[in-house]
Amino acid sequence: MEKQRENRAKDPEFIVAVAAFSIFGGVLLIAALVLAGIHYMTSFLLGMSLYVLALAVILVSELAIRKKLPTFSLVMTSIGIGGVYAATYVNGSWAKLVLKEGQGAADSSLTLGNFPAWAGVGVTVVFTLLVVLYGYKRQAGTFRTVSLLMCSFCLR
């Protein structure tokens, strides 16, 4: 029985399925918390709690889970990194950067507007630099990839 479990854990389909479902589950968890926050919190409290939640995921993943389950820790830390970018996008006033003259004056319904767009750009750039440096230190290309993809999404 133990040998069968080891063989299954080395199977490429099993590895891909575990990674895909863990990422999908993390995305659904973050979406559920955001939707719950939209209905039950003020905009400032919701925005700051998104940061706290994302940073808590990163800290728990790196400090508690990393030694026992390194692959799962990599996935959870990547989800936390994406959560920080999502929180920055939701908190900033990005609609003013995206909307051009003549496209209408309506702000995006996805942004809370807790801080101006230039502050969001600053947070995004500084966090990207920190994650890229941490990715080099830990030799985790996944962190660098997630960080650069989410940075390009935020600064589009």
Image: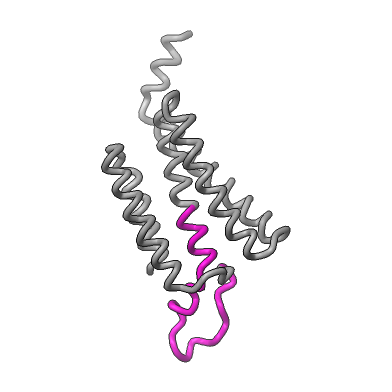
Residue at image coords 37%, 60%: 151
Residue at image coords 49%, 64%: 89
Residue at image coords 59%, 60%: 47
Residue 99 is a magenta residue:
yes
Image quadrant assignment for residue 49: bottom right
Residue 125 vs residue 97: left or right? left
Residue 69 at x, y = what percent?
44, 26
Location of residue 122 with respect to 27 vertically, above or below? below
Q: Quick one: 4 or 103, which is closer to the camera? A: 103
Location of residue 72 with respect to 2 vertically, above or below? below
Q: Which residues are magenta?
A: 84-110
Residue at image coords 47%, 91%: 102
Q: Quick one: 90 or 15, which is closer to the camera? A: 90
Q: Quick one: 154 or 118, which is closer to the camera? A: 118
Q: Residue at the bottom extreme? A: 102
Q: Residue at the right extreme? A: 40
Image quadrant assignment for residue 107: bottom right
Residue 148 vs residue 120: left or right? left
Location of residue 64 with respect to 112 vertically, above or below? above
If the image is split into quadrants, where does the C terminus sit? bottom left
Residue 153 vs residue 59: left or right? left
Residue 132 is a magenta residue:
no
Residue 79 at x, y = what percent?
47, 45
